[in-house]
Image (cartoon, rainbow, N blue to C red):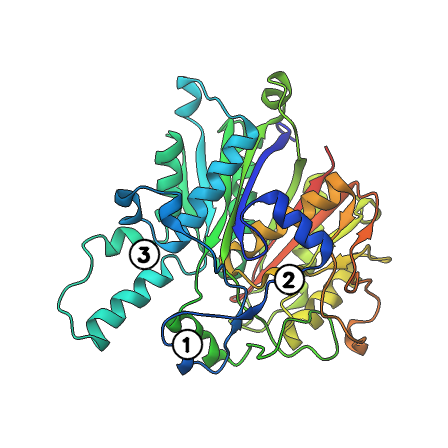
Amino acid sequence: MGRRVAITGAGTVNALGPDVTTTWAALAAGRVAIGPMDFEEIDRLTVRIGAQIKDWDGAAHFARQEMALYDRAVQFACEAGRQAVAQAGLDLSDEETLRAGVVMGTGVGGQTTMDDSYRAVHAQGKNRVHPFTIPRLMHSAAASHLAMRHGLKGPAFTVSTACASSNHAMGLAFQMVRSGAAPVMLTGGSDAALCFGGLKAWEGLRVMSPDGCRPFCASRNGMVLGEGAAVFVFEDWERAVNRGATILGEMVGFAMTSDAADIVLPDPDGAVRAMRGALGDAGLNPEDVGYINAHGTATAVNDRSEALAIRTVFDAPPPVSATKSMHGHLLGAAGAVEMLAVLMALGDGVIAPTVGWQREDPEVLGLDVVPNVARRAKVGAALSNAFAFGGMNACLAVRRA
């Protein structure tokens, strides 16, 4: 089975809060961060709600030279990474820095940089863009800057598999530590697509809700986008124990599958195989799982497909909640922020609710979606689902430390 993998640090910047403690409190309280957005040309959009980080001041966190290089998504990732490393109390030897690394997930990379550049060239008629436009918008930027900021000279790369990006990234980081290829990995995801171009593209798909995110509810009418990042420190278990680190949870299983069916419509079989694969990798039985953090986008097709998959894997499904109802859908960063809810359930015994739920959908019967109010429960193991466009599925299994 390889080495055991501990999660020893966590950090986040999202619409629920600027750090893990604030985010956990918001999740436990069922606070919704979705509301009216404010950015350039928003009056040209049909859908004007999202989970936007409105009080973010990058200049308060980074030097002027850094701000010239950091897209909004990279700023979120670097601050989340700083928090995670600080909480872990990470101190690497010179030899360890040569093998420690970073795997990050993102769906759209530097979307705001791209939007600003297109506006400058096409709308404002400028003949030049910022000289650092490419380094700012490239999908690998967050991984590169995290590696540079923390002196990590081992594997450093980005995974981009739409809304499964973070789960794929964390799964690959888990496998590297478990195999012994790396003693420590930073991993998670970051996205910041709340800008005119990003939202206008999503409007074209007609999957956006104009009035709120209500996963698994009969009245659900679409997803709501959010922005932010979450980063974790994955560490060799023995290393963590020997240095006296606080362990937030143990990563124990990972599986990824492809539907190989449709570019936007999910196939429940792919989700079934991902969940069963993660359970098998972790050596867990379905009855060992006390909580599932659902992909739960609040689109009609996704929620129906995921509910069917869960009922197929679990004869008696455990509590299932969709925290996108509070922090929005962060695209490639969604799974990373949702991992915070998983760690809260395991460590604090608090299952975050599915907020906005109003009434049962006959096609989603058989699930306890923890409607609207958080719940106390002793959770020994949990799954986190991510089922993305393109039929790319990634499921993580985590156990209480």
Image quarter where the N terminus lies is top right
Residue name at image x 56 percent, y 49 percent: 336
Residue on which the image places disc 1: 42
Number of numbered callouts drawn:
3
Q: Amino acid at mark 1?
A: Ile
Residue name at image x 74 percent, y 59 percent: 353
> Can residue 283 be seen here?
no
Q: Residue 361, percent across and down?
A: 78, 77
Residue on which the image places disc 2: 326
Instruction: In this rendered view, identify the residue nearer to me: 183 or 211.
Output: 211
Q: Residues within 10 Å of mark 2 (few under 14, many from 20)?
A: many
Image quadrant where residue 134 sits: bottom left
Cα separation between marks 3 and 1: 21 Å
Residue name at image x 60 percent, y 62 percent: 33
The numbered dot on residue 145 is none
Viewed as shown, does residue 54 lie left or right of 324?
left
Instruction: In this rendered view, identify the residue nearer to me: 140 or 191.
Output: 191
Q: Residue furthest left?
A: 127
- Please tell me whether mark 3 sits on a helix, a strand or a loop: helix
Mark closer to the observer (3, 1): 1
Q: Residue 42, percent across and down?
A: 41, 76
Cα separation between marks 2 and 3: 27 Å
Q: Residue 122, percent across and down?
A: 22, 75
Residue on which the image places disc 3: 137
Q: Residues within 10 Å of mark 1 (few under 14, many from 20)?
A: some
- Please tell me whether mark 1 sits on a helix, a strand or a loop: helix
